[in-house]
Image (cartoon, grey):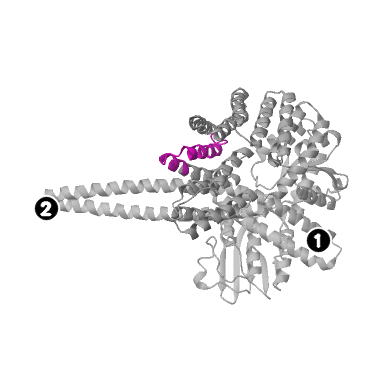
Amino acid sequence: MKYSFLFVAFSCTIFLSISVSGQNNQSQIDSTNNNRLESLIKSIRNNFYSGNYADVINQIPDAVLLAKTLEDIEKGHMLNSVLGNTFIKLKDTIQAREVFIEMLEESINAKQPKYVMAISIDLGNTYVNSNPELAIEYFNKVIVLAKEHNDSHRHFIAQYNLAELYLNKKKPVIAKKHIDAAFPIIDTIDGVAIYEASLDMILGRYYLTINNPAEAIINFKKSIKTAKDNNLKELLLENYTYYLEALDLQKDYMGMYEIRKMYKPIREEIYEASKIYEIEVAKAKYNIDQYKQTIVTQKLEKQLAEQKAKDSKTITYAAIGIMIILLIAMLSFLNSLKKRKRLLIILRERNKQYLLAKQKSEKLSKAKAQLFSTVSHELRTPLYGIIGLSSSLLIDNKEPKLNQDIKSLKFSADYLLALVNDVLHLNKLEEQEGGVLENELFSIRDLIKNIAKSFEFMRDQNSNEIIISIAPTIPDVLIGDATKLSQILMNLIGNSCKFTEHGTISLDILQNKESPDTISLTFKITDNGIGIPKEKQQQIFDEFIQISKNTKYQGTGLGLPIVNKILALLSSKLEFNSKLGEGSSFWFTVGYIKASQELIEKNSAASENNGYYKSSHLLVVDDNRINQIVSQKMIENCGMTCDTASDGLEAIERVKVNKYDIILMDINMPIMNGYEASEKIRTMDITTPIIALTAIDIEGASNQLSKYGINDYIIKPYQVNHFKKVISRNLTAKHL
């Protein structure tokens, strides 16, 4: 969700400016607590403007508690507003909205119009994308209040927000009315350059919307000058973005080239200055809190259901008692009837509570799914760079003494990626998005070899030996879901490697049953590690459970729950046997289809057709420089050559003058995203395969991709073998 720079900047400037000016009656409050509150507010303000949102979220609860202790209502309002705007910065409008709604109710009840206006602006901003009509309603209310109380600042903000909202809705006539209303207000406000620059920019956007790029450029230039004079870099970046659109309408490509030279350094400076890691830590912590809250809610639902059953029994016994009492006296019957009515009232009330708890649980689940998607993209993108560069360094490194350090770096990145994937896989399985099984040809021996190779670092670290035994009667090529088999074996072998030192881990694959077309295989993983205590063996399939409290055996506790859920999809079950101090054995049985010789030969001919590699020239489109380097290295290691482009517009220009065998297209890019770029390229070139590169799991979205002319996709970070497989598949299809 995109918010104007002016939206959040204004709200927090107003509230944070109050933070150090609010005065308390020092004779009635504890001076130590007051000084501590002032110190916390200054720290929160600095962390907010520095982008340290993790620290903001961690500090605000203590500050709010202090404000309540000191009965400082003004600072309490300010702190809650900062919390809501922090959630907006993190794109979590659900939590921001809850904070603002509670604040608005308190401000209305306390008859504080200043706070009502400020919070209404914040609340309206959270509805801009999801419910624009409700956002318009909030902004119009602010205009009425601002005129009543002669509040120029908030009057201007409401008019500006409405103008931008109507431009986003492609309603320029209404937007122009609000722009015209905003200009006179500026004359009543001194020293706010951001207002002037923002309004010039929004007027430029108006002319751009009505297809008048010449007037638009005049206003963009005015806004850019003000933004430069006042070092408003984010506003400057937004101006350049729309300036490029206006130049594109004029087909002024030389002008676009000049603007882009100014645009790119500012964009890179802003991106480098952002605190991605701290933001993600705060979001991950908040996600865990939400997950724990979901568990608490589920327990409450269970308790309510048990209580409901208990009440039903009570009613039944009461009914029997009433029948007996009827034989004794009518008076006893009337008393029992009254009791029964009271119980029914209680039951209805508890049913209402159950429904509210259920609705809250569903709401939390939706918020969790959205947060998982964001985490997926934001964590996988930097991991792609780390894993890719470390893999390239292992190939190109000419300093043997650095090999161990590079392997350690790659292992750490792979381990972090595995933890991220564990959480995302578990979420997909819970949401029934991971229940689709793929049938593809794969070599069972090559698959096992690659899995064992991935544990070389951990094996050497713990001084273990991995022994693999595959029954010779098992065919080499099978048909089934190799990805899910890999996930199962990686988790089970990874556990054995983690809990075994100076020992042996064995993987035995045995033939179980066979028919002319199918074969059933039993996979058994055995180790002589620390084993599992008997009293904890029933807990190993519970999520987030750690059997050992020893810090040297760390992990998420998700491996075995994920294995169990995947095996359920494969109509199988994990069996195990373990003794403390002696080791553990895990085994399961899965059926596969036997590949025909004709199908094997056809697949082999396609995979061996690597002659296309050496003559192939690719285009890599990615706005991240590190990602470009990683993709370029991988392409060159495959014997191919490539060009690079940093956004969709640049990619289109390159396709106009060059011929490419494949285009690797990032989806999330500024200026023009991968979908739009692919769609435009298809109007010029209908044969070149386009492969999407994305850090978001878009499994099952092939229909959406093909709608934009995209042939295939690769999820970052990816393994070299999978990258080669997708490239080879598309090169082969192109030359057929």
Q: CA distance from mark 1 to mark 2?
A: 92 Å
Packing grade of label 2 (10 A; few <14, some 14-19, many >=20) is few
Up/down of 351 relative to 528, above or below: above
Task: Tell me residue 697's x, y (percent).
Answer: 65, 47
- Dominant secondary structure (helix, strand or loop) of the stretch shown in magenta: helix
Query: In the depicted view, which residue is nearer to us: 331 or 524?
Result: 331
Sooner in the amino-acid sequence: mark 1 or mark 2: 2
Q: Quadrant of residue 704?
A: top right
- Circle 1: is it few (<14), some (14-19), or many (20+) Cα within 10 Å? some
Magenta region includes residue 53: no
Image coordinates of residue 479 in percent, x first then y, are 68, 52
Which residue is identified by label 1?
A: 394
Residue 128 lies in the magenta-colored region:
yes
- Amino acid on which disc 2 is placed: Ile
Quadrant for the C terminus, please: top right
At a point 65% along the width and 72% down the height, the residue shown is: 500
Q: Which residues are magenta?
A: 103-131
Residue corresponding to mark 2:
328
Residue 591 visible within the image? no
Q: Tell whether 704 sits left or right of 387.
A: left
- Would residue 5 be found to the left or right of residue 304 on screen? right
Residue located farthest toward the right when viewing the structure as drawn: 615
Q: Is residue 120 left or right of residue 671?
A: left
Amino acid at the residue labelled 1: Leu
